[in-house]
Amino acid sequence: MKGIVRGSLKSLGINALVKVEIVDLPQCIINVDCTQTPL
């Protein structure tokens, strides 16, 4: 299974792009890219 999920962390009050890459269970690679610095 290969999947790419993109979301934003607004619940934490932080604007950031979350890139989640799932390659062959149960291996999960989570890449978090922050576009803006938190308060």
Image (cartoon, rainbow, N blue to C red):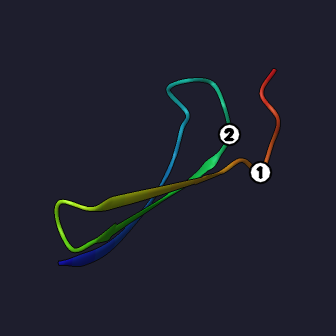
Left or right of residue 23, residue 7 in this image: right
Query: Which residue lies at the image location 26% right of the left edge and 62% below the top edge?
Result: 27
- Viewer-proximal residue among 30 and 16: 30
Label 1 Cα crowd, 10 Å radius (few <14 / some 14-19 / many 20+): few
* Position above or below: 23 against 34: below
Label disc, if present, on residue 17 of the rendered structure: none
Give coordinates of residue 20: x percent, y percent: 42, 60
Query: Which residue lies at the image location 63% right of the left edge and 24% below the top edge?
Result: 13
Left or right of residue 26, residue 39 in this image: right
Left or right of residue 21, residue 27 in this image: left
Give the Cα distance between marks 2 and 1. Answer: 7 Å
Q: Residue furthest front?
A: 27
Q: Are marks 2 and 1 in contact (CB under 8 Å)?
A: yes
Query: Which residue lies at the image location 72% right of the left edge and 47% below the top edge?
Result: 34
* Position above or below: 11 against 4: above
Location of the N terminus (image quadrant): bottom left
Query: Which residue lies at the image location 21% right of the left edge and 74% below the top edge?
Result: 24
Give coordinates of residue 26: x percent, y percent: 18, 60
Label disc, if present, on residue 15 of the rendered structure: 2
Which is nearer the N-term, disc 2 or disc 1? Answer: 2
Left or right of residue 10, residue 27 in this image: left
The secondary element bearing badge 1 is classed as loop
Give coordinates of residue 4: x percent, y percent: 38, 71
Q: Amino acid at mark 1?
A: Thr
Location of the C terminus (image quadrant): top right
Query: Disc 1 marks which residue?
Result: 35
Q: Amino acid at mark 2?
A: Asn
Give coordinates of residue 10: x percent, y percent: 55, 33
The secondary element bearing badge 2 is classed as loop
